Image: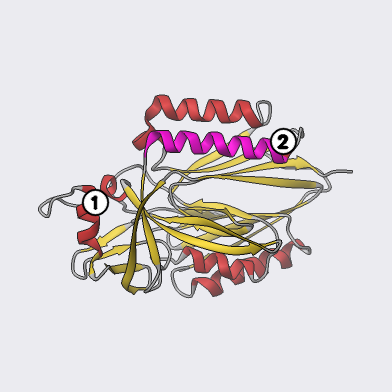
Amino acid sequence: MGFGGEALRASAAVQREVQIEPKEKGRAIARELKEKLGAEPKMVVTFYDPLCGIDAEAMIAGMRMELSCPIAGAGSGQPWGVPLETVQFWETEAMNHGAVALALNGPFTTEIGLSHGTAPSGIYGVVTKARGNTIEEIDGRPAIEVWREVTGCADNELLHQSHFAIWAVGVERTVTIGGEEKTDRVIRGAFGFDPQTGGVMLQAAVPEGTKIMRHHRTIEEVLNGTAKMADDLLQRLDGRSPWAVLGFECAARTYPFLGPVNTRAEHKALRESIAPRAPWLGMMAWGEIGPCLGQTAFHNYTYPVVTFLSEAK
């Protein structure tokens, strides 16, 4: 997909070892993007290494300190299986532990949709011990025990990616918009287990004392969520036709969960609904960045979609 025209401006930035002081690294990326662009971006797209121990939410918070525009993007992925390595690209360099970002400015606007891929079970718990990105205890029990109990994985079985993806943790967020309190959720999925501490490793910190809800996944929930996102986007597009679309769908939603037939059907219906004639570009993500109650947030098991539109005259 190519973006061009005399009115379009772009800049790019990189940070390495983003697991170290991720908030400051995110802020540095955003500052460099603005300096190179010479203006406030209208859209920023970012990719990062999800396996380096980064707190993705902290990186986003740093970027938001410098940027007022929408931010979307994802953790780099790898083939489905045991998590080993993801790679980021900068110029002619291939790296790990990196984050790269692209800023765009020009005569365009965006509308961003987001589809959740989980359903709340109604079963709450409390994080009683946490360390960085690792939840060590839930309700006073080792978190790995709770995960095994929910997934049905026996003690003598090795927890692997299929067990990561069966269920997730939902963290509620409440903000006041226009004098009205609104609540939504961000989803946290497991990206590793620490048998020594009994911890479950995430891509973002969940502090001690946080009330969490168990979320489960069904094919119906995923497909209905995508259809709901399409309806919401159509309402906001209000008859306008996007000229380009970017998608960042969680890799654990597609072939490993929905299967080939449902995955193709999901995308065919979504494209025909919101932008049948526009070019689409996308990826299978390991952690997604998209909106939550008007703010940029980190998610798992979601599908952010960015539509580009001509600026109203």
Residue 145: image location, x then y, percent: 19, 60
Residue 93 visible, this angle: no
- Tag nearer the camera, 1 or 2: 1
| Residue 150 numbered tag | 1
Mark 1 burial class by Cα count in 10 Å: few <14, some 14-19, many 20+: some
Relative horizontal placement of residue 113, taking residue 298 as reference (left or right): right
Which residue is under mark 2?
242
List the single residue furthest toward the right.
313
Q: 276 or 233, which is in the foreground?
A: 233
Residue 16: image location, x then y, percent: 49, 67
What residue appears at the point 56 percent right and 64 percent down from the top-left corner?
60
Relative horizontal placement of residue 151, taking residue 122 as reference (left or right): left
Q: N-terminal of the two: label 1 or label 2?
A: 1
Q: Which residues are magenta?
A: 218-236
**Picture layout, residue 295 above or below residue 150:** below
Q: Amino acid at mark 1?
A: Val
Cα–Cα gap, marks 1 and 2: 42 Å
Residue 193: image location, x then y, percent: 26, 60
How many numbered discs?
A: 2
